[in-house]
Each structure stands twice: as structure tokens, then as C-alpha cells.
Amino acid sequence: MRIACVAVPELELQALVRADPELAGRPLAVVDGRAGRRTQEVTELMMATVGAPVAVARAGGGGGGVATVTSVGGRAAVPVVARAAAPGLVTRVRAVSEAAYAAGVRAGLTVAQARAIWPSLEVRPADAVQIAAARAALGDVGLSFAPKVEVEGAEAFLEIGDLGRLFQSEREIALGLAARARAVGLSARVGIAASKGLARLAAWAGDVEDGRPRGESLRVVAPGQEAAFVADLPVALLRPSPAVHEALERWGIRRCRDLGALPIKEVALRLGNEGERLHRLARGQSDEPLRAQPPEATIEEGVSLDFAIYELESLAFVLRGLLDRLLERLQGRSLACAALTLRLQIEHRGHDVREVPLAAPTRETATLLELVRLHVARRPPEAGIVGVTLVAHPARVRGSQLDLFCPAGPAPDRLAQTVARLEALVGEGAVGAPRPVDTYRDEAIAIAPYRPPAPSPLPPSGGETARGREREGVAATDVARQPLARGPEEGCLALRRFRPALEVEVLMDGGRVPRALSGSDLSAQVVVAAGPYRVRGEWWAAGGFARDYWDVHASDGTLYRMFCDPAGRWFVEGYYD
Amino acid sequence: MLPARSPLDLAELRTIVQRSTRALPFTPAQTGLAAIDEALGGGLPRRRLTELVGKRSAGRTSFLLAVLAAATQRGEAVALVDVAGMLDVRSAAAAGLVLERLLWVCPRNLGPGPEDTPPGRQREGEWLRRGLRAAELILAAGGFGLVALDTGEGLPRVADATWLRLARGAERSAPPGAVLLVASASRAAGSFAAVGLELERGRVLYSRSHASLGPDAGEACGERRPEGLSGSMRVNGAPMDVERMPRLAAGAGARSREAPPPLVRGRAVSLKVARSKLGTPPGTVPVTWRLR
């Protein structure tokens, strides 16, 4: 068995950079999510009143307290360092970027200490939604190569034993995994070895500075070379628990070689099961099983916003980034978005969840963005948006074979986009495929979503005319040999409706037959009247109706269809046209 | 084995393909009525704007539905931008229109509400503006074999630029090319229409079916015969042929839903090819629309 490990160093930090690529290369520190927000609020408060003690009532946590500005940095516009008097306000850095690390900022420092080192340090709270999305994206990297994938923390493990037919070497697989991770916005280290534990070691080994992995790395441990590979690695890379690590330090065990040289029974006796496991690993042996997880049914990408969004254009900007990341993950797994759910976190009002219907699975950002934008524009949220999450329901892309003898219909994704635009233009419920309703009210009409069936083969060209064939380039002699079939000379007389029906005044002849009609849009004498034909319906319900229909030939040459309701009111329903 | 480099570079190849594509003939869209197709030289021209003009009861809606039905029966996707909301779905089905293939866009608000009141001139103009924009969007989407725009009864002034955009939209439609058919009560598209069709009213056909209904048919279906009417007459210049007039018994028959077919059975009209930029010779075709 061959296992690949794709490890993402500083996942929290990379999740932030992935969501906001402008942060790449800048000095950045990630702090605890809630504490980070408190720190930001305190800092804003400080900037308003530099130099003065500020009561931190809105900061919450720790029962409030008094924070004082300890350094100003020359101008009020420069972020200041707040020293919190209350314990709840002390936040610590969890991860730092390369630039911040180079400047001396380390994980574990308080925000105040970190900013004292680098005043312009970007401090961002860890976003649980973004971290979860980054972790899921890591799983998608594995799923784009193999069906059996396990995601554990910031690492993804996958079995690659069957990929030999697709890749010339395991190094190519490692290169492909790293490239795929880059495509979804993650910088990953890849290790390939005979077992899960060794693959993890291969991923994290090398390019380490002060115990901090630097950038990407690729390492393939050839079969049979496991013990030699592990021997020189530091014991800390085996991730012992603090107690065991302290014991090993006390014994003077620094390298795996030293640990592997110890008798396993003695190690197990003193360090328990963990010691035995570490010992085996230090000798290049690992039987840690791969616990493959089923792929998630949906793919989510989300972002929490620092400030509420009230405008559609600003939201579209956020949505584009989310969609790009979402579709990149789908593309890696050869999937497309079959349905989209938009979850908006509304200021003070909970969530606004919307389903965006799609005519066909698609991976086009522009199409999806337009559909979501139109959907939101049609019914804007009632308050500012402070969080956006997009959930894609994936589906396989099925290529359709076009028929040479069938007319190609509209492309499903463009059609969906067009229908959405039309609905935005003319209103919802006024676009679609009409269909009759099972009722006695003839004017009733229902609108179904427009999904034209697959084109059917064209009929034989019997109904074509000679001139039409000449246009197609068919020789006149060929036409002459074929009998020219003629279509019907008659068509179907249609009723053209007024919506709503026009109310008119009707002059009756002896109280029985219409003689003249007059309304806002018409005024004519009746030449011929036929009727009445009574139509009744829904008598079993409160909205029952009864109408006496008449067909009249008016003096203006129009053939009207009109009816009289039980209240004696007359309406022109339409005319035969 | 393929050569390492083709003697044709990409730009040249693109030019050749574009030139050959332009030269491809576009099969006219048949209307389903052989006589009209013959007069139009095979059918309605694709990638062109065709204007259909007709007064009330001249058969404008019947012609529109017939063309739409023929297109859907060929398997094409079609669109009807119905500014006035005039579509009678039962008539459409009777005409043979495959409703699943019809994209119906009705700029008029059909639901209950303040807009559901008798329309004013300004509101009609807004509906028409939306309808024109909707037709543009549909043409731009591509894949539709026929895009019909029914402008309704009154036609507020439409800027020439709008018709130009529509005509250009039809020209740019992807193969096999869309037919853009604009139906209105009076001429609207002007010189932007490649073909102009005009419908003129003819005689009205009445049913003979009352006799076959039995001696009580007159009790069931009343009919008023104007005084002095005999055989045929002219109404507003249009000849009207009354084939049979049962005795007057209006109001006697309150029939159930299974009512006899209306007395109006059809109407004869004439379709005139009034103008054409495609070389189609002017001509008039008699057509009979019958109730089904």
C-alpha cells in the first residue's frame, strides 16, 4: 500500500489568505476568533480617544475592564496597542505569516506584544467558516486523485496505489497533488510513503526552520527506505504528547535513531502504548489504518464580514470570490454545480436562506454569479449582510451528444441565466412554459418552469417548397422528381384574450339578446349574436361562478366573445383573431 | 502523422471558416401553411425581422400561433413575448403548439394587485418597453428558432434604435438562426423589417351544426338575425356570409359545460406580402381560420 499525505502548514492562516488573497505576503497574525473581534473593537475605541483611559463596556468578556493606551505611534491614525486590564481581553497570536515571522512575531505572543514588534501587523480573527472550507478543500484535493481520502486536522491522506497507470512516478503524483492544492488556494507539503504515519513524517520532514515548516515540499520515501528515512528525523516530528516528549528529552533522546535503538519492551513499560507506537514509528514501521471518509454531499464556501454589506455590488464582489473557490473545488472533482443555496447572515436578524434554481449543472462563474445577483436583487435582504455562505449541490457533468438532424436548443446554462434576467425584468411568475389548468375558467393559465424537452428529429422534408429547397442548394431537377406535398390550407382560429376581461355595457334587445356594446376601448352594434352558453364551475366552493357566454359579430368587424355574470355585469373576454 | 506546423495559420483558418459560415444558406422557417410558405419563398426568413400587421379579428393571433406551432413541431424552442397577455392556452394547444417548447414572457402583471386595473397609456408603454427588452434578451441567449413579439393593441412610439437592436439581435443569432416575428395592429418596425405581412379580414363563417343538434337546438342556442338580413351582407366593408340562421330563442338554453360549439366557425382572411427586402414578390394568399 502506498499512502500520500497532503499537509497544510498554518491552516488557519492559509484559510484567511485563501479567502482574501490580498493578504498574501503581508505581515499577518491570526488570533482567536472572538477575542480577535474584541481586540479590534477595543483598538477602534482607543483610536477615538488616544491617551485617555477608556471604559471597555462593549468589549464584554471578563466582565469588562479598563484598557489603557500604552503607545500611540506618533499619529492617531496608526493602530495603537491596547493593554487590557481585564483577563478576557488578552488575546494571543495563534499563527503568523512568513513576513511576520521574519520580523520576529511568534505564535503565543499577545496581540500587544506582537504589535509592539511590528506596529502595522495585520491582526485577523480566525474564521471558523473559512477554516472549515479550507479543510474541506483539502479533502477535495485528495478526492480529485483517489476515492479513499481521510482528512485529519490539516492533513489529508489518500491511497495512491492504483494511480500507477495514470502517472509515471510517485513524484509526479506528489507534484500533481501540490498543484491541485495550489489551485484551491492552499500551499501544501506532500509526502508519499508505505503507511499513513510515515507519509505524515515525509510531508512534514525537511525545509524546517526553528521547528517551523517553510513553504511547500515534496518527499517520496521509496519502498524499503523507510527506516533510513526516519532515522535522522527529530523525535518531536513523531508528535509525542507533552509528558512523553519531556521524558524523551530527559533521557537525551533527540533523534528517531536513538529512540529506535531502545528495547521496545522497556520503552513500552515506561511510556505505555504511546511509547510503543512511537518506537515502531521511529524504526520505520507504522500500522496506522487509513480511515476513509465518504465525500460530503455538498460543498460549502463562506465568509464572515467585518462590516455589514448593504449594496448589491459589494455583495457581488464577495460572491465572486466564493464562487471562484467553490467552482475550483468542483472542477477538481470533475463535478458541476447542480443547485445552489445562498445563506446570508443578516445583521441582528438571523439567516436568510435562498435556493437558487439552476436549469442544468454548470461550472461557469459568470452564470452563477448573475443568477445569484438577480435572485438577491429581486428580493433584497431587509438588513445588512454580515456573513455569506454558498452551498453547492454537486452533480456529474454529462455531456450531451448533439444530433445532426435535430435543431439545437438553447444552452441550459445560458437559458437559466436568460430566464432569471427575464424574471427580473417582468416579474416572477410571468416567465415560463404556459399550460392549461384543470378548471372551467377558460382564462386560467399556469406557468411551469421552462425546460424544453430534447429536440426531436426533424420531419421528412415533404412539406418544403421548391424555392426553399433551392435556397438549400438542392437541384431543381431533384425537386421535380419528388412529389411536392402541400400542407393544410386552413389554420386554427384562435381566441385573443383581454387580461383582465373588459367590462362593458350591453344594450339588450327585449332583455334577451345583446344589441350593442360599449366600453372603454370599444363601441359597436351587434350584427349577429349567438348564445347564451352557460358555463358553471366551482359551485362546491365559495368562489363558484356562472357565466352566460355569447359570441357576437360586432359592427366594427370584430368577433367578440363576451359573458354575463349572475350580477348582470357584462365582460368582453376576448375576440377571435 | 500530422505535420508539426499547418501551412494555414490560425487567423487565415478563422477567416475561411467565417466566410464559409456566412455563405451557408439558412433554411426558411415553414409556417405550416403551404400556400403561405410558397408565397414567402419557403417560409419566414431566419435571422431577419418579419413584421405582421393586422386589425382585430384579422387572424393575427391565429397566424402567430400557427407559426409557433409549426416551429415547435419541428422540435425548435420558441419564445412568445406577449405584451398584452393575450395568449389563450386552449387555442394554442388546439393550434398544435407544443407548450413545453414555448417560453412565454408576459410583461403584464397577471396576478391580482394594483396593476390589474384597466391599463393606462403610460403603463402600456412600460409593458412594451419591457417586452422589447425581453425579446432582445431571448435573441441574445441563442438557441431559439422563433422569437415572436406581440405588441398588443395600442402601440406607443418605439425608438428606431430599439428596432435596430432587435434586427441586429436576430442577425447575430446562432445557426440555424432565429426568426424574429413582430405582430402588431399597425406598422411599427418600419424599414427594419425584412418582410412585411399584412392581414385583411374576409368573411365570417358560421356553423351549420345547429340543425344536426335536433329540433331543440334552437332552444339551446339562441341566435339573433338582424332585420332584413338575407344570405350575405357587408359589415365595415367585409363580406359576411350567413349560411344558416336558426330561429331566435335567446336566453332559453342554459347549457352545461358540454355546450355546442360556438356559432362562429371560422373566418376567411387574406395574407398579403406587402414588402420584402429579400426579393420575395408581392402577393396575396387566402387563408381560412377555423375553430377547432
Image (cartoon, rainbow, N blue to C red):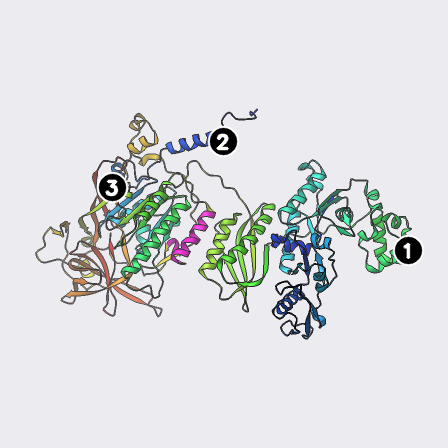
Quadrant holding the N terminus of chain B: top right
Residue of label 2: B10
| Residue interval drawn in magenta | A413-434
Looking at the picture, which amino acid does disc 3 mark? Glu
Residue of label 1: A251
**Secondary structure of the residue carrying numbered label 1:** helix
Residue A451 pos. (x, y %) = 43, 50
**Secondary structure of the residue carrying numbered label 2:** helix
Q: Are marks 3 and 2 in contact (CB under 8 Å)?
A: no
- Chain that bears disc 1: A
Looking at the picture, which amino acid does disc 2 mark? Leu
The answer to whether A315 appears left or right of B78 in the picture is: right
Name the disc covering residue A489, or none.
Answer: 3
- Which tag is nearer the camera, tag 1 or tag 3? 1
Q: Determine whether A234 is above or below B249 in the image.
A: above
- Chain that bears disc 2: B
Looking at the picture, which amino acid does disc 1 mark? Trp
- Chain that bears disc 3: A
Relative depth, front residue between B96 and B119: B119
Circle 1 packing at 10 Å, graded few (<14), some (14-19), many (20+), is: few
Q: Determine whether B285 is above or below A241 in the image.
A: above
Cα distance between the residues tagged 1 and 3: 104 Å
Secondary structure mostly taken by the magenta-highlighted segment of the chain? helix
Residue placed at 34% from the left, 32% from the top? A472
